[in-house]
Every structure is written in C-alpha cells, then in structure tokens.
Image: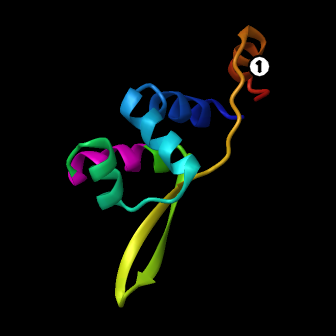
Amino acid sequence: MELEKMVKICEALSNPIRIKIYYLLSEKPYNIYELSKTIGLSRPVIYAHLKKLENADLVESTMILEEGRAKKMYRAKDFSLYIDKEVIRNLMRGKG
C-alpha cells in the first residue's frame, strides 16, 4: 500500500460517524436520505462524510432508477489495513 492511500484510509476512519456509516453500508446499500434518517444527521453532513469515505476508496456509489426517480446508492467496499513499524519503515523507504 502507498503512503498516501494509507493516510486517506486512516483519516476517513478517524471519525466515529464515518465508522458508523461504513458499518451500515457494509450491511446493505443506502441512499443519503436513508442514512440521514438512520443516523439522525442532516443530509449535507452525511454527504460530507460520504465524500471523505469515497476519497479513501472505502465507499462507492451507483445511480439506480426507482419509480421513475434516480437515486444514488452507496455501499461499502472491502479493504484491509495492517500497520506496524516494519510497514511504516518500508513506506518511508519507498518500498510500500
């Protein structure tokens, strides 16, 4: 894994709301409205958290048509992250 990617993942998962969103999206796809209602936060706040998760490549979205309306559905992507001093050494030496 590259240093930049590791940092993005760590930053994205450094917030308990984003961890909760990731967990929910790992259970089933949601749209912003459903996430907002489930978590109890406004859609703009949910959207900001989703963008952070998307930028870290932890979440992906697809557009679907439902009853003639387009909806953007989000789902969690699989990932694995392991960090120890050897991983950090290799990243700093350009071996990551």
Looking at this view, is 27 or 92 the one in front?
27
Residue extending furthest toward the front: 38
The percent coordinates of residue 45 (x first, y second) are 24, 45
Does residue 32 show up magenta in the picture? no
Count of number-bearing discs: 1
11 to 93, vertically: above or below: below
Tell me the chief SS of the magenta region.
helix
Can residue 33 be seen here? The reply is yes
Residue at the extreme bottom? 68
Q: Is residue 57 above or below residue 83?
A: below
Q: Residue at x 40, y 27 (%)?
A: 16
Q: Quadrant of the C terminus?
A: top right
Quarter where residue 80 is shown: top right
In-front residue for pair 50/75 = 75
**Taking 69 as reference, is 56 left or right?**
right
In reply to whether residue 50 is colored magenta, the answer given is: yes
Q: Is residue 47 visible?
A: no
Location of residue 68 with respect to 84 vertically, above or below: below
Q: Which amino acid lies under the numbered mark 1 shown in the image of this protein?
A: Asn
Where disc 1 sits, the SS reads helix
- The quadrant in which the N terminus is found is top right
Q: Residues within 10 Å of mark 1 (few under 14, many from 20)?
A: some
Mark 1 — residue? 90
Q: Which residues are magenta?
A: 43-52
- Judged left or right of residue 63, residue 89 is right
From this view, report whether residue 72 is shown above or below residue 43: below
* Front one among 86 and 19: 19
Q: Residue at x 23, y 53 (%)?
A: 43
Residue at point 41%, 83% (across, down): 66
Residue 2: percent from the left, percent from the top?
A: 67, 34
